[in-house]
Image (cartoon, grey):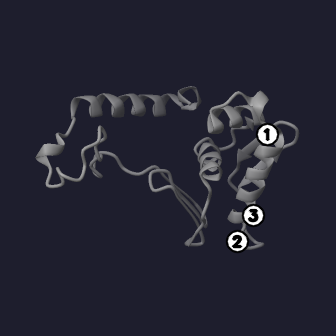
């Protein structure tokens, strides 16, 4: 997944990881010490803003796992959201069926058919198209795969 990031995104991710390694918050110092006992910390909002994308009527937030169209929440399955996230975070980039299976399912593409990807993308498109005048955000690249394209 790191390979798909732009140079700026790679720098930001590296900075984020290094900051989090050195700025660990001890859960015992928080008022919620009896509730939160895991190895994860909750990032402070000011330091780590949400990854948000607004394209006309479409709103996407990665951290909230939220997609809305015309302020209507679009309920997506885990795989639909992961496919959409990959596409919208890399606009105009074409993802082959094999790349989608590798990056979303984390499996060798020989075990899955293109039909599985097609079915998830078809369901995703239906959910995003809540009105006939809305654009098709997920475009097919015939015989290759899919991409997110702004209108």
Crowding at mark 3 (Cα within 10 Å: few <14, some 14-19, many 20+): few
Task: Indicate the position of residue 75 as horizontal and vertical percent values.
Answer: 60, 64
Secondary structure of the residue carrying numbered label 2: loop
Does 21 sit left or right of 91 as displayed? left
Residue found 73% across the figure and 51% down from its top: 120
Residue position for label 3: 126
Q: CA distance from mark 2 to mark 1?
A: 23 Å
Check the picture and name the quadrant holding the N terminus: top right
Q: Residue at point 17% right, 40% down?
A: 26
Marks 3,2: beta carbons within 8 A: no
Horizontal arrangement in the rendering, residue 60 relative to residue 128 (left or right) = left
Q: Which residue is nearer to you in this view: 138 or 151?
A: 138
Circle 1: element type: strand
Q: For mark 2, what is the residue? A: 130
**Mark 2 surroundings: few (<14), some (14-19) or many (≥20) residues within 10 A:** few
Looking at the image, residue 45 sits to the left or right of residue 96; the answer is left
Q: Dot 3 lies on which element? A: helix
Give residue 145's mark: 1
Q: Work out whether 49 lies above or below 19.
A: below
Looking at the image, do the residues carrying marks 2 and 1 touch, with CB atoms under 8 Å apart? no
């Amino acid at each position: 997944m790191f390979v798909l990031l732009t140079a700026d995104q790679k720098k930001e991710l590296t900075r984020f990881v290094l900051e989090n390694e050195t700025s660990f918050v001890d859960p015992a110092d928080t008022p919620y010490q009896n509730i939160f006992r895991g190895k994860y910390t909750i990032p402070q909002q000011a330091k780590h803003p949400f990854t948000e994308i607004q394209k006309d009527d479409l709103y996407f937030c990665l951290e909230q796992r939220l997609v809305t169209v015309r302020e209507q929440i679009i309920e997506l399955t885990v795989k639909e959201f992961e496919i959409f996230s990959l596409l919208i975070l890399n606009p105009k980039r074409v993802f082959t069926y094999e790349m989608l299976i590798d990056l979303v399912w984390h499996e060798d593409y020989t075990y899955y058919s293109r039909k599985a990807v097609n079915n998830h993308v078809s369901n995703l498109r239906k959910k995003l198209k809540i009105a006939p005048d809305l654009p098709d955000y997920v475009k097919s690249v015939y015989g290759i795969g899919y991409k997110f394209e702004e209108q």
